[in-house]
Image (cartoon, helix red, strand yellow):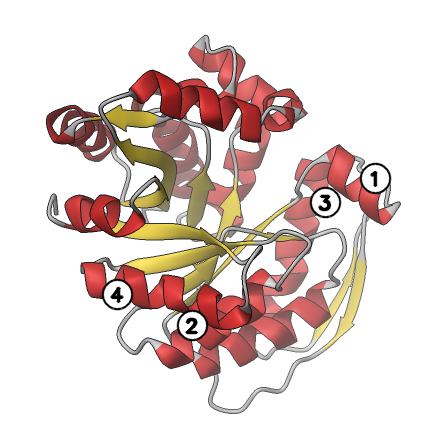
Amino acid sequence: MRIGMFAIAAGAPLDDVVAQARLARDAGLDSVFFGHVPSWDGLMAAALAGRETPGLEVGTAVVPTWPRHPIALASQALTAAAMAGGRFTLGIGPSHPPVIEGGHGIPYERPARHVREYLSALRPLLRGEDVEYRGETLTAVGTVDAPGATPPPVIVSALGPAMLRVAGELADGTVTTWTGAAAIADHIVPSITRAAEAAGRPAPRVLAGVVVALTTDPDRARRELAEQYAAASGFPGYRAILDRQGLSGVHETVVAGDEAAVERELRRFADAGATDLLISPRGDAARVLEFAASLR
């Protein structure tokens, strides 16, 4: 199982964002994936980090689809892939109603259909093909000419059955969040693998995002995260995966404790079939990342 870092490109100067990628590389990790929030652009941060940290895979987890047309995103993604020397992975997802409707004023309707149509247009655009796609949720007519750029792999944020089916049929894998090892084993891996096999596609990549804290007070770590991400527990997509796991909030998915406890929990993700872990470190980030890298 590959182990990487999940980073947020926000709340710090851009040089500090790139420093997160260097921290991941110096810890011996395989990758760093950037989230996208209203701050530094996650895709551009990944592209810059890829240029500054040779040998490290960089990616997004994830770029929201609704505000970016597939032609525009294909152009950006191919640029990022070229800047990162072919080590860029594009993660996309529909985001959440409060973000898309509340912030962007875009109706959040039929997200699985939207992502299916988005991928149907995006994948050939990334290959440099002429596209004339007219669906129920979007239209894309054109091509993207990026000489020498390698089409990046595409992963989808997928937690529910419909989105996992789309990811298995049309993407290269999925990236999860607030999802424990048991749900990866019982729900995520079987669902996306069945869809990929039915579509005649290779085995999908499953990147499991997990918050990790090395601490003598795991309850405090969970309380702090509960306060910081209180709103996330109410987002419909997250609420559904939490309910599937019998959890009250996102804080209950945190892996926290001493080295033995953390190692035990992280190894469960490998046993569950995750191909990658994306560690979001709490507390001493360097210590957490170096310990995670030592488990490979």
Instruction: Name the residue: 40% across, 80% down.
Output: 51
Q: Alpha-carbon distance for marks 4 and 1? A: 37 Å
The percent position of residue 231, horizontal first and vertical second, equals: 65, 26
Q: Label 3 sits on what residue type?
A: His
* Residue located beneath label 4 in the image: 25
* Nearest-to-viewer mark from 4 and 3: 4
Q: Alpha-carbon distance for marks 3 and 2? A: 30 Å
- Say which of 295 and 163 sits in front: 295
Q: Alpha-carbon distance for marks 4 and 2? A: 11 Å
From where the camera sits, is residue 133 visible?
yes
Left or right of 134, for residue 27: left
The label on residue 101 is 1
* Nearest-to-viewer mark from 3 and 1: 1
* Residue located beneath label 3 in the image: 114
Q: Alpha-carbon distance for marks 3 and 1? A: 15 Å
Q: SS class of the residue under badge 2?
A: helix
- Say which of 219 and 105 sits in front: 219
Q: How many marks?
A: 4
* Residue located beneath label 2 in the image: 49
* Nearest-to-viewer mark from 2 and 1: 2
Left or right of 208, for residue 16: right
Instruction: Name the residue: 48% across, 56% down.
Output: 34
- Whichever of labels 4 and 2 marks the residue nearer the N terminus, that label is 4
Instruction: Name the residue: 61% across, 28% down.
Output: 232
Left or right of 51, for residue 249: right
Query: Is the Cβ of the residue at disc 2 closer than 8 Å to that at disc 1?
Result: no
Q: Alpha-carbon distance for marks 4 and 3? A: 35 Å
Instruction: Name the residue: 55% across, 30% down.
Output: 228
